[in-house]
Image: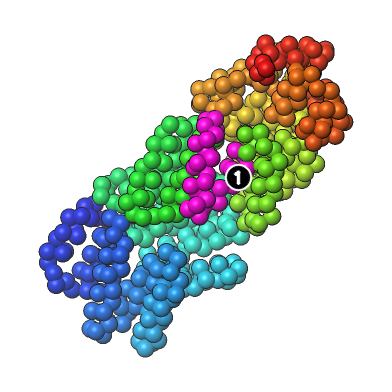
Amino acid sequence: MESVSDWTATIGELTAAEPLAPADLEQLATALFMVGREDDYVAALERAFEAYEQGGEALRASRCAFWIGMEFFMGGEISRGSGWFARAHRLLDADGSDCAERGYLMLPEMYRLKFGGDMHGAIATAGEAAEIGRRFGEPDLTALATQSRGVFLIEAGRPREGLALLDEAMLSVTSGELSPMPTGIVYCSCIEGCRVAFGPRRAQEWTNALHLWCERQPDLLAFTGDCHLHRSELMELHGAWADALGALDRATARATRAGNTRVLAHAAYLRGELRRLQGDLAGAERAFREAASGGHEPQPGLALLRLAQGDVGAACGAIRRVLEETSDTAARAQLLAACVEILLAADDVDAASEACGELAMIAEQSVSDQLAALAAHGRGAVELARGDAGAALPHLRAARTGWRDLGAPYEAARAQLLIAQACSALGDDDSAAIDREAAMGVLAKLGATEGRRDTHGLTQRELEVLRLVAAGHTNKAIAVELVLSERTVDRHVSNILAKLRVASRAAATAFAYEHGLVARG
Protein backbone atom coordinates (compact mmCIF):
# COMPACT_ATOMS: atom_id res chain seq x y z
CA MET A 1 0.00 0.00 0.00
CA GLU A 2 1.22 3.53 -0.74
CA SER A 3 2.72 5.39 2.20
CA VAL A 4 1.16 8.64 3.39
CA SER A 5 3.65 11.43 2.65
CA ASP A 6 2.45 14.17 5.03
CA TRP A 7 2.31 12.59 8.46
CA THR A 8 1.99 15.88 10.30
CA ALA A 9 -1.14 16.77 8.34
CA THR A 10 -2.58 13.32 9.06
CA ILE A 11 -2.01 13.82 12.79
CA GLY A 12 -3.71 17.21 12.67
CA GLU A 13 -6.73 15.93 10.76
CA LEU A 14 -7.24 12.91 13.01
CA THR A 15 -6.71 14.85 16.23
CA ALA A 16 -9.31 17.40 15.09
CA ALA A 17 -11.81 14.59 14.51
CA GLU A 18 -11.73 13.26 18.09
CA PRO A 19 -13.25 11.04 19.39
CA LEU A 20 -11.81 8.46 16.99
CA ALA A 21 -12.85 4.97 16.04
CA PRO A 22 -10.30 2.22 16.84
CA ALA A 23 -9.15 1.97 13.20
CA ASP A 24 -8.56 5.73 13.13
CA LEU A 25 -6.59 5.47 16.36
CA GLU A 26 -4.34 2.89 14.67
CA GLN A 27 -3.81 5.27 11.77
CA LEU A 28 -3.02 8.07 14.20
CA ALA A 29 -0.55 5.81 16.01
CA THR A 30 1.26 5.05 12.75
CA ALA A 31 1.55 8.75 11.88
CA LEU A 32 2.87 9.54 15.37
CA PHE A 33 5.50 6.81 15.08
CA MET A 34 6.65 8.05 11.70
CA VAL A 35 7.33 11.56 13.01
CA GLY A 36 9.23 10.20 16.02
CA ARG A 37 6.61 10.70 18.71
CA GLU A 38 6.97 7.18 20.10
CA ASP A 39 5.38 7.81 23.52
CA ASP A 40 2.31 9.25 21.81
CA TYR A 41 2.37 6.32 19.39
CA VAL A 42 2.11 3.86 22.27
CA ALA A 43 -0.64 5.92 23.93
CA ALA A 44 -2.72 5.93 20.74
CA LEU A 45 -2.28 2.18 20.29
CA GLU A 46 -3.28 1.58 23.90
CA ARG A 47 -6.50 3.51 23.26
CA ALA A 48 -7.13 1.41 20.14
CA PHE A 49 -6.44 -1.78 22.11
CA GLU A 50 -8.94 -0.83 24.82
CA ALA A 51 -11.60 0.09 22.26
CA TYR A 52 -11.18 -3.16 20.34
CA GLU A 53 -11.18 -5.24 23.53
CA GLN A 54 -14.30 -3.54 24.85
CA GLY A 55 -15.97 -4.03 21.48
CA GLY A 56 -15.24 -7.75 21.50
CA GLU A 57 -12.79 -7.58 18.58
CA ALA A 58 -10.16 -9.85 20.12
CA LEU A 59 -8.01 -10.29 17.02
CA ARG A 60 -7.68 -6.57 16.33
CA ALA A 61 -6.96 -5.94 20.01
CA SER A 62 -4.28 -8.63 20.05
CA ARG A 63 -2.59 -7.07 17.02
CA CYS A 64 -2.43 -3.70 18.82
CA ALA A 65 -1.00 -5.47 21.87
CA PHE A 66 1.65 -7.07 19.65
CA TRP A 67 2.88 -3.74 18.25
CA ILE A 68 2.90 -2.14 21.70
CA GLY A 69 4.89 -5.10 23.00
CA MET A 70 7.37 -4.83 20.14
CA GLU A 71 7.94 -1.14 20.85
CA PHE A 72 8.89 -1.92 24.45
CA PHE A 73 10.76 -5.13 23.56
CA MET A 74 12.98 -3.51 20.91
CA GLY A 75 13.53 -0.52 23.20
CA GLY A 76 14.98 -2.77 25.89
CA GLU A 77 11.95 -2.74 28.20
CA ILE A 78 11.62 -6.51 28.11
CA SER A 79 9.22 -6.93 31.03
CA ARG A 80 6.72 -4.37 29.74
CA GLY A 81 6.96 -5.89 26.27
CA SER A 82 6.37 -9.38 27.65
CA GLY A 83 3.32 -8.14 29.50
CA TRP A 84 1.73 -6.88 26.29
CA PHE A 85 2.60 -10.11 24.47
CA ALA A 86 0.91 -12.02 27.29
CA ARG A 87 -2.23 -9.91 26.81
CA ALA A 88 -2.19 -10.70 23.10
CA HIS A 89 -1.82 -14.44 23.80
CA ARG A 90 -4.65 -14.31 26.33
CA LEU A 91 -6.99 -12.80 23.76
CA LEU A 92 -6.02 -15.32 21.09
CA ASP A 93 -6.39 -18.26 23.47
CA ALA A 94 -9.88 -17.07 24.41
CA ASP A 95 -10.80 -16.61 20.75
CA GLY A 96 -9.40 -20.00 19.75
CA SER A 97 -9.31 -19.34 16.01
CA ASP A 98 -6.47 -20.04 13.61
CA CYS A 99 -5.36 -16.57 12.55
CA ALA A 100 -2.53 -14.38 11.27
CA GLU A 101 -2.11 -12.80 14.69
CA ARG A 102 -0.58 -16.06 15.95
CA GLY A 103 2.14 -15.58 13.33
CA TYR A 104 2.87 -12.05 14.52
CA LEU A 105 3.37 -13.34 18.06
CA MET A 106 6.00 -15.75 16.76
CA LEU A 107 8.22 -12.77 15.94
CA PRO A 108 9.16 -11.92 19.56
CA GLU A 109 9.54 -15.64 20.20
CA MET A 110 12.10 -15.99 17.40
CA TYR A 111 14.13 -13.12 18.91
CA ARG A 112 13.94 -14.76 22.32
CA LEU A 113 15.34 -17.96 20.82
CA LYS A 114 18.09 -16.09 19.00
CA PHE A 115 19.22 -14.12 22.03
CA GLY A 116 19.07 -17.33 24.05
CA GLY A 117 21.56 -18.96 21.69
CA ASP A 118 19.10 -21.19 19.80
CA MET A 119 19.68 -19.86 16.28
CA HIS A 120 18.27 -23.05 14.72
CA GLY A 121 15.03 -22.55 16.65
CA ALA A 122 14.90 -18.88 15.69
CA ILE A 123 15.31 -19.73 12.00
CA ALA A 124 12.58 -22.37 12.18
CA THR A 125 10.18 -20.07 14.05
CA ALA A 126 10.70 -17.27 11.53
CA GLY A 127 9.92 -19.74 8.74
CA GLU A 128 6.69 -20.81 10.46
CA ALA A 129 5.64 -17.18 10.90
CA ALA A 130 6.30 -16.44 7.22
CA GLU A 131 4.21 -19.45 6.22
CA ILE A 132 1.30 -18.22 8.35
CA GLY A 133 1.62 -14.82 6.70
CA ARG A 134 1.41 -16.39 3.24
CA ARG A 135 -1.52 -18.58 4.25
CA PHE A 136 -3.58 -15.63 5.50
CA GLY A 137 -2.53 -13.21 2.76
CA GLU A 138 -0.65 -10.95 5.24
CA PRO A 139 2.23 -9.33 3.31
CA ASP A 140 3.44 -7.37 6.37
CA LEU A 141 3.85 -10.52 8.46
CA THR A 142 5.33 -12.48 5.55
CA ALA A 143 7.97 -9.84 4.83
CA LEU A 144 8.87 -9.23 8.48
CA ALA A 145 9.35 -12.95 9.13
CA THR A 146 11.14 -13.57 5.84
CA GLN A 147 13.70 -10.80 6.34
CA SER A 148 14.30 -11.93 9.93
CA ARG A 149 14.90 -15.49 8.80
CA GLY A 150 17.28 -14.20 6.13
CA VAL A 151 19.33 -12.21 8.64
CA PHE A 152 19.44 -15.20 11.01
CA LEU A 153 20.70 -17.47 8.22
CA ILE A 154 23.45 -14.98 7.35
CA GLU A 155 24.48 -14.78 11.00
CA ALA A 156 24.48 -18.59 11.13
CA GLY A 157 27.00 -18.77 8.26
CA ARG A 158 24.52 -19.52 5.46
CA PRO A 159 24.76 -16.30 3.44
CA ARG A 160 23.46 -17.61 0.10
CA GLU A 161 20.17 -18.74 1.62
CA GLY A 162 19.91 -15.65 3.76
CA LEU A 163 20.52 -13.14 0.98
CA ALA A 164 17.95 -14.87 -1.22
CA LEU A 165 15.34 -14.37 1.51
CA LEU A 166 16.31 -10.72 1.91
CA ASP A 167 15.83 -10.25 -1.82
CA GLU A 168 12.40 -11.86 -1.53
CA ALA A 169 11.38 -9.61 1.36
CA MET A 170 12.58 -6.52 -0.52
CA LEU A 171 10.34 -7.36 -3.47
CA SER A 172 7.36 -6.78 -1.19
CA VAL A 173 8.81 -3.44 -0.11
CA THR A 174 9.67 -2.08 -3.54
CA SER A 175 6.32 -3.17 -4.99
CA GLY A 176 4.49 -1.13 -2.33
CA GLU A 177 2.71 -4.13 -0.77
CA LEU A 178 3.59 -3.26 2.83
CA SER A 179 2.25 -0.83 5.42
CA PRO A 180 4.50 2.13 6.30
CA MET A 181 6.05 0.80 9.52
CA PRO A 182 6.87 -2.69 8.18
CA THR A 183 8.28 -1.00 5.06
CA GLY A 184 10.81 0.95 7.12
CA ILE A 185 11.61 -2.05 9.33
CA VAL A 186 12.28 -4.34 6.39
CA TYR A 187 14.36 -1.71 4.58
CA CYS A 188 16.65 -1.17 7.56
CA SER A 189 16.88 -4.83 8.53
CA CYS A 190 17.72 -5.98 5.01
CA ILE A 191 20.43 -3.34 4.66
CA GLU A 192 21.85 -4.44 8.01
CA GLY A 193 21.80 -8.02 6.71
CA CYS A 194 23.88 -6.90 3.74
CA ARG A 195 26.39 -5.31 6.10
CA VAL A 196 26.65 -8.55 8.05
CA ALA A 197 27.15 -10.47 4.79
CA PHE A 198 29.70 -7.90 3.51
CA GLY A 199 27.56 -7.19 0.46
CA PRO A 200 28.08 -3.49 -0.36
CA ARG A 201 26.53 -3.73 -3.83
CA ARG A 202 23.17 -4.93 -2.48
CA ALA A 203 23.44 -2.49 0.40
CA GLN A 204 23.98 0.35 -2.07
CA GLU A 205 20.93 -0.61 -4.12
CA TRP A 206 18.65 -0.89 -1.12
CA THR A 207 20.05 2.17 0.64
CA ASN A 208 19.30 4.23 -2.46
CA ALA A 209 15.74 2.89 -2.43
CA LEU A 210 15.37 3.63 1.30
CA HIS A 211 16.68 7.16 0.76
CA LEU A 212 14.11 7.81 -1.97
CA TRP A 213 11.33 6.43 0.24
CA CYS A 214 12.42 8.73 3.08
CA GLU A 215 12.71 11.74 0.76
CA ARG A 216 9.10 11.32 -0.36
CA GLN A 217 8.05 11.91 3.26
CA PRO A 218 9.60 15.25 4.29
CA ASP A 219 8.38 15.10 7.90
CA LEU A 220 9.45 11.48 8.40
CA LEU A 221 11.74 10.99 11.39
CA ALA A 222 11.56 7.25 12.04
CA PHE A 223 14.14 5.22 10.05
CA THR A 224 15.87 8.34 8.65
CA GLY A 225 18.75 8.18 11.14
CA ASP A 226 19.53 4.62 10.04
CA CYS A 227 19.20 5.65 6.41
CA HIS A 228 21.85 8.35 6.79
CA LEU A 229 24.10 5.92 8.68
CA HIS A 230 23.93 3.40 5.86
CA ARG A 231 24.59 6.09 3.26
CA SER A 232 27.60 7.32 5.23
CA GLU A 233 29.20 3.88 5.39
CA LEU A 234 28.85 3.43 1.64
CA MET A 235 30.16 6.94 0.97
CA GLU A 236 33.23 6.18 3.08
CA LEU A 237 33.84 2.95 1.17
CA HIS A 238 33.59 4.79 -2.15
CA GLY A 239 35.93 7.57 -1.06
CA ALA A 240 33.38 10.38 -0.67
CA TRP A 241 34.56 11.21 2.84
CA ALA A 242 33.23 14.78 3.04
CA ASP A 243 29.79 13.57 1.94
CA ALA A 244 30.01 10.74 4.49
CA LEU A 245 30.64 13.22 7.30
CA GLY A 246 27.67 15.27 6.09
CA ALA A 247 25.45 12.17 6.19
CA LEU A 248 26.63 11.49 9.74
CA ASP A 249 25.72 15.03 10.74
CA ARG A 250 22.22 14.44 9.36
CA ALA A 251 21.97 11.08 11.13
CA THR A 252 23.02 12.70 14.39
CA ALA A 253 20.51 15.53 14.00
CA ARG A 254 17.69 13.08 13.30
CA ALA A 255 18.69 10.75 16.12
CA THR A 256 18.93 13.65 18.58
CA ARG A 257 15.38 14.75 17.74
CA ALA A 258 14.13 11.18 18.08
CA GLY A 259 16.16 10.41 21.20
CA ASN A 260 17.74 7.43 19.42
CA THR A 261 20.90 6.73 21.41
CA ARG A 262 21.77 3.67 19.30
CA VAL A 263 22.06 5.72 16.11
CA LEU A 264 23.93 8.49 17.95
CA ALA A 265 26.54 6.03 19.21
CA HIS A 266 26.93 4.31 15.85
CA ALA A 267 27.29 7.69 14.10
CA ALA A 268 30.01 8.64 16.59
CA TYR A 269 31.92 5.45 15.78
CA LEU A 270 31.74 6.04 12.03
CA ARG A 271 32.86 9.64 12.55
CA GLY A 272 35.82 8.34 14.53
CA GLU A 273 36.80 6.05 11.66
CA LEU A 274 36.70 8.91 9.16
CA ARG A 275 38.69 11.20 11.45
CA ARG A 276 41.29 8.47 11.93
CA LEU A 277 41.68 7.98 8.19
CA GLN A 278 42.08 11.74 7.75
CA GLY A 279 44.77 11.92 10.43
CA ASP A 280 42.66 13.85 12.96
CA LEU A 281 43.69 11.57 15.79
CA ALA A 282 42.37 13.81 18.57
CA GLY A 283 38.99 14.05 16.82
CA ALA A 284 38.94 10.29 16.35
CA GLU A 285 39.70 9.76 20.04
CA ARG A 286 36.77 11.96 21.07
CA ALA A 287 34.42 10.22 18.65
CA PHE A 288 35.36 6.70 19.76
CA ARG A 289 34.90 7.67 23.40
CA GLU A 290 31.48 9.10 22.57
CA ALA A 291 30.56 5.86 20.77
CA ALA A 292 31.66 3.77 23.75
CA SER A 293 29.73 5.93 26.22
CA GLY A 294 26.63 5.39 24.07
CA GLY A 295 27.01 1.62 24.14
CA HIS A 296 28.65 1.06 20.73
CA GLU A 297 31.78 -1.13 20.68
CA PRO A 298 34.65 1.21 19.66
CA GLN A 299 36.72 -1.59 18.15
CA PRO A 300 38.45 -2.16 15.83
CA GLY A 301 38.60 1.59 15.18
CA LEU A 302 40.10 2.44 18.58
CA ALA A 303 42.81 -0.21 18.26
CA LEU A 304 43.73 1.11 14.81
CA LEU A 305 43.82 4.61 16.30
CA ARG A 306 46.29 3.42 18.95
CA LEU A 307 48.38 1.98 16.12
CA ALA A 308 48.31 5.32 14.31
CA GLN A 309 49.39 6.99 17.57
CA GLY A 310 52.38 4.63 17.75
CA ASP A 311 51.13 2.65 20.75
CA VAL A 312 51.47 -0.80 19.22
CA GLY A 313 51.19 -2.57 22.57
CA ALA A 314 47.83 -0.98 23.38
CA ALA A 315 46.58 -1.76 19.87
CA CYS A 316 47.55 -5.42 20.23
CA GLY A 317 45.99 -5.72 23.67
CA ALA A 318 42.71 -4.17 22.52
CA ILE A 319 42.30 -6.20 19.34
CA ARG A 320 43.18 -9.47 21.06
CA ARG A 321 40.74 -8.75 23.89
CA VAL A 322 37.80 -7.99 21.63
CA LEU A 323 38.52 -11.01 19.42
CA GLU A 324 38.44 -13.28 22.46
CA GLU A 325 35.02 -11.88 23.37
CA THR A 326 33.55 -12.07 19.85
CA SER A 327 32.05 -15.25 18.42
CA ASP A 328 29.86 -13.78 15.68
CA THR A 329 31.42 -14.64 12.32
CA ALA A 330 30.72 -11.34 10.58
CA ALA A 331 32.02 -9.29 13.50
CA ARG A 332 35.14 -11.47 13.71
CA ALA A 333 35.87 -10.93 10.02
CA GLN A 334 36.07 -7.15 10.48
CA LEU A 335 38.18 -7.56 13.60
CA LEU A 336 40.52 -10.07 11.97
CA ALA A 337 41.32 -7.71 9.10
CA ALA A 338 42.40 -5.07 11.62
CA CYS A 339 44.17 -7.70 13.72
CA VAL A 340 46.42 -8.69 10.80
CA GLU A 341 47.50 -5.08 10.29
CA ILE A 342 48.15 -4.51 14.00
CA LEU A 343 50.05 -7.77 14.58
CA LEU A 344 52.28 -7.13 11.57
CA ALA A 345 53.10 -3.72 13.02
CA ALA A 346 54.03 -5.55 16.23
CA ASP A 347 56.32 -7.92 14.28
CA ASP A 348 54.22 -10.92 15.31
CA VAL A 349 54.10 -12.40 11.82
CA ASP A 350 53.08 -15.86 12.96
CA ALA A 351 50.06 -14.57 14.88
CA ALA A 352 49.15 -12.32 11.96
CA SER A 353 49.31 -15.32 9.66
CA GLU A 354 47.00 -17.27 11.96
CA ALA A 355 44.49 -14.43 11.99
CA CYS A 356 44.75 -14.18 8.23
CA GLY A 357 44.06 -17.90 7.91
CA GLU A 358 40.83 -17.59 9.88
CA LEU A 359 39.81 -14.59 7.77
CA ALA A 360 40.47 -16.59 4.60
CA MET A 361 38.27 -19.45 5.87
CA ILE A 362 35.41 -17.04 6.55
CA ALA A 363 35.85 -15.50 3.08
CA GLU A 364 35.79 -18.93 1.39
CA GLN A 365 32.48 -19.78 3.06
CA SER A 366 30.89 -16.48 2.06
CA VAL A 367 29.64 -15.01 -1.19
CA SER A 368 31.33 -11.68 -0.54
CA ASP A 369 33.76 -9.98 -2.91
CA GLN A 370 34.57 -7.59 -0.08
CA LEU A 371 35.65 -10.41 2.24
CA ALA A 372 37.68 -11.95 -0.58
CA ALA A 373 39.52 -8.65 -1.04
CA LEU A 374 40.13 -8.33 2.71
CA ALA A 375 41.54 -11.86 2.89
CA ALA A 376 43.77 -11.38 -0.16
CA HIS A 377 45.06 -8.07 1.20
CA GLY A 378 45.91 -9.67 4.54
CA ARG A 379 47.64 -12.67 2.98
CA GLY A 380 49.73 -10.44 0.73
CA ALA A 381 50.79 -8.28 3.67
CA VAL A 382 51.78 -11.35 5.69
CA GLU A 383 53.86 -12.83 2.86
CA LEU A 384 55.57 -9.48 2.39
CA ALA A 385 56.39 -9.32 6.10
CA ARG A 386 57.90 -12.77 5.84
CA GLY A 387 60.21 -11.50 3.12
CA ASP A 388 58.59 -13.42 0.27
CA ALA A 389 57.65 -10.60 -2.08
CA GLY A 390 57.10 -13.01 -4.96
CA ALA A 391 54.44 -14.92 -3.02
CA ALA A 392 52.88 -11.67 -1.84
CA LEU A 393 52.31 -10.09 -5.26
CA PRO A 394 49.49 -12.36 -6.59
CA HIS A 395 47.47 -11.82 -3.39
CA LEU A 396 48.07 -8.07 -3.41
CA ARG A 397 47.13 -7.74 -7.07
CA ALA A 398 43.94 -9.74 -6.42
CA ALA A 399 43.15 -7.43 -3.50
CA ARG A 400 43.70 -4.29 -5.57
CA THR A 401 41.47 -5.62 -8.35
CA GLY A 402 38.78 -6.60 -5.85
CA TRP A 403 38.82 -3.18 -4.19
CA ARG A 404 38.70 -1.40 -7.52
CA ASP A 405 35.75 -3.52 -8.64
CA LEU A 406 33.95 -2.54 -5.43
CA GLY A 407 34.72 1.13 -6.04
CA ALA A 408 36.85 1.37 -2.87
CA PRO A 409 39.72 3.76 -3.74
CA TYR A 410 41.28 3.97 -0.28
CA GLU A 411 41.64 0.22 0.13
CA ALA A 412 42.80 -0.17 -3.47
CA ALA A 413 45.50 2.47 -2.91
CA ARG A 414 46.70 0.74 0.27
CA ALA A 415 47.02 -2.52 -1.65
CA GLN A 416 48.91 -0.70 -4.40
CA LEU A 417 51.41 0.68 -1.86
CA LEU A 418 52.14 -2.88 -0.76
CA ILE A 419 52.53 -3.89 -4.40
CA ALA A 420 55.10 -1.12 -4.80
CA GLN A 421 56.91 -2.41 -1.73
CA ALA A 422 56.96 -5.95 -3.14
CA CYS A 423 58.20 -4.76 -6.55
CA SER A 424 60.97 -2.80 -4.85
CA ALA A 425 62.03 -5.87 -2.87
CA LEU A 426 62.21 -7.82 -6.13
CA GLY A 427 64.44 -5.17 -7.72
CA ASP A 428 61.78 -3.70 -10.03
CA ASP A 429 62.26 -0.08 -9.05
CA ASP A 430 60.46 1.38 -12.08
CA SER A 431 57.23 -0.49 -11.36
CA ALA A 432 57.55 0.29 -7.67
CA ALA A 433 57.86 4.00 -8.36
CA ILE A 434 54.87 4.00 -10.71
CA ASP A 435 52.65 2.10 -8.26
CA ARG A 436 53.76 4.21 -5.31
CA GLU A 437 53.14 7.47 -7.17
CA ALA A 438 49.69 6.36 -8.31
CA ALA A 439 48.68 5.19 -4.84
CA MET A 440 49.99 8.31 -3.13
CA GLY A 441 48.04 10.46 -5.59
CA VAL A 442 44.79 8.68 -4.72
CA LEU A 443 45.44 8.91 -0.99
CA ALA A 444 46.33 12.60 -1.21
CA LYS A 445 43.12 13.28 -3.15
CA LEU A 446 41.10 11.47 -0.50
CA GLY A 447 42.80 13.41 2.28
CA ALA A 448 44.12 10.22 3.88
CA THR A 449 47.03 10.35 6.32
CA GLU A 450 49.12 8.10 4.08
CA GLY A 451 48.79 10.64 1.27
CA ARG A 452 50.53 13.40 3.21
CA ARG A 453 54.01 11.97 3.00
CA ASP A 454 55.76 9.25 1.05
CA THR A 455 57.20 6.68 3.45
CA HIS A 456 59.04 4.99 0.55
CA GLY A 457 57.52 1.64 1.40
CA LEU A 458 58.62 1.60 5.05
CA THR A 459 56.22 0.18 7.59
CA GLN A 460 55.42 2.03 10.79
CA ARG A 461 57.78 -0.24 12.76
CA GLU A 462 60.55 0.33 10.20
CA LEU A 463 60.03 4.08 10.55
CA GLU A 464 60.44 3.71 14.31
CA VAL A 465 63.66 1.76 13.80
CA LEU A 466 64.93 4.31 11.26
CA ARG A 467 64.27 7.13 13.75
CA LEU A 468 66.48 5.39 16.30
CA VAL A 469 69.14 4.56 13.71
CA ALA A 470 69.20 8.24 12.73
CA ALA A 471 69.60 9.12 16.43
CA GLY A 472 72.76 7.00 16.53
CA HIS A 473 71.42 3.99 18.46
CA THR A 474 72.98 0.56 18.01
CA ASN A 475 70.84 -2.42 17.10
CA LYS A 476 71.15 -3.65 20.69
CA ALA A 477 69.92 -0.32 22.06
CA ILE A 478 67.06 -0.24 19.54
CA ALA A 479 66.03 -3.75 20.64
CA VAL A 480 65.85 -2.59 24.26
CA GLU A 481 63.97 0.60 23.33
CA LEU A 482 61.33 -1.18 21.23
CA VAL A 483 61.26 -4.40 23.27
CA LEU A 484 62.35 -6.52 20.30
CA SER A 485 64.99 -9.15 19.78
CA GLU A 486 68.29 -8.05 18.22
CA ARG A 487 67.61 -10.48 15.38
CA THR A 488 64.31 -8.73 14.61
CA VAL A 489 66.02 -5.34 14.67
CA ASP A 490 68.75 -6.67 12.33
CA ARG A 491 66.01 -7.75 9.91
CA HIS A 492 64.32 -4.36 10.09
CA VAL A 493 67.58 -2.52 9.42
CA SER A 494 68.30 -4.78 6.43
CA ASN A 495 64.81 -4.14 5.06
CA ILE A 496 65.24 -0.39 5.52
CA LEU A 497 68.53 -0.34 3.63
CA ALA A 498 67.01 -2.44 0.83
CA LYS A 499 63.87 -0.33 0.49
CA LEU A 500 65.75 2.96 0.53
CA ARG A 501 68.40 1.59 -1.85
CA VAL A 502 71.26 2.70 0.40
CA ALA A 503 74.30 0.77 1.56
CA SER A 504 74.89 2.01 5.10
CA ARG A 505 73.26 3.30 8.26
CA ALA A 506 74.79 6.71 7.63
CA ALA A 507 73.27 6.81 4.15
CA ALA A 508 69.90 5.74 5.54
CA THR A 509 70.10 8.54 8.10
CA ALA A 510 70.88 11.11 5.41
CA PHE A 511 67.99 9.81 3.26
CA ALA A 512 65.63 9.98 6.22
CA TYR A 513 66.43 13.62 6.97
CA GLU A 514 66.39 14.61 3.30
CA HIS A 515 62.96 13.08 2.68
CA GLY A 516 61.35 14.06 5.99
CA LEU A 517 61.02 10.51 7.31
CA VAL A 518 62.36 11.62 10.68
CA ALA A 519 62.44 15.02 12.32
CA ARG A 520 65.70 16.75 13.05
CA GLY A 521 66.45 17.06 16.76
- Evaluate whether residue 404 shows in this view: no
Secondary structure predominantly adopted by residues drawn in magenta: helix
- Tag 1's secondary structure? loop
From the viewer's perspective, tell me whether residue 122 is left or right of residue 511: left
The residue shown at (87%, 31%) is: 487
Query: Which one is nearer the viewer's eye here, 220 or 460?
Result: 460
What amino acid is at disc 1? Pro
Rendering colour mode = rainbow
The residue shown at (52%, 44%) is: 288
Query: Which one is nearer the viewer's eye here, 489 or 195?
Result: 489
Pointer 1: residues within 10 angstroms few (<14), some, or many (20+)?
A: many
Image spot of residue 469 (x, y percent): 78, 20
Image spot of residue 310 (x, y percent): 66, 33
Is residue 364 depicted above or below 124 in this figure?
Answer: above
From the viewer's perspective, tell me whether residue 255 is left or right of residue 219: right
Image spot of residue 169 (x, y percent): 44, 57
Is residue 195 depicted above or below 328 in this figure?
Answer: above
Q: In which quarter of the image is the N terminus?
A: bottom left
Q: Quadrant of the C terminus?
A: top right
Q: Does the magenta stretch include residue 320?
A: no
The magenta stretch is 277-305
Residue 514, by quadrant, is top right
From the viewer's perspective, tell me whether residue 64 is left or right of residue 135: left
Is residue 226 depicted above or below 54 in this figure?
Answer: above
**Residue occupied by mark 1:** 300
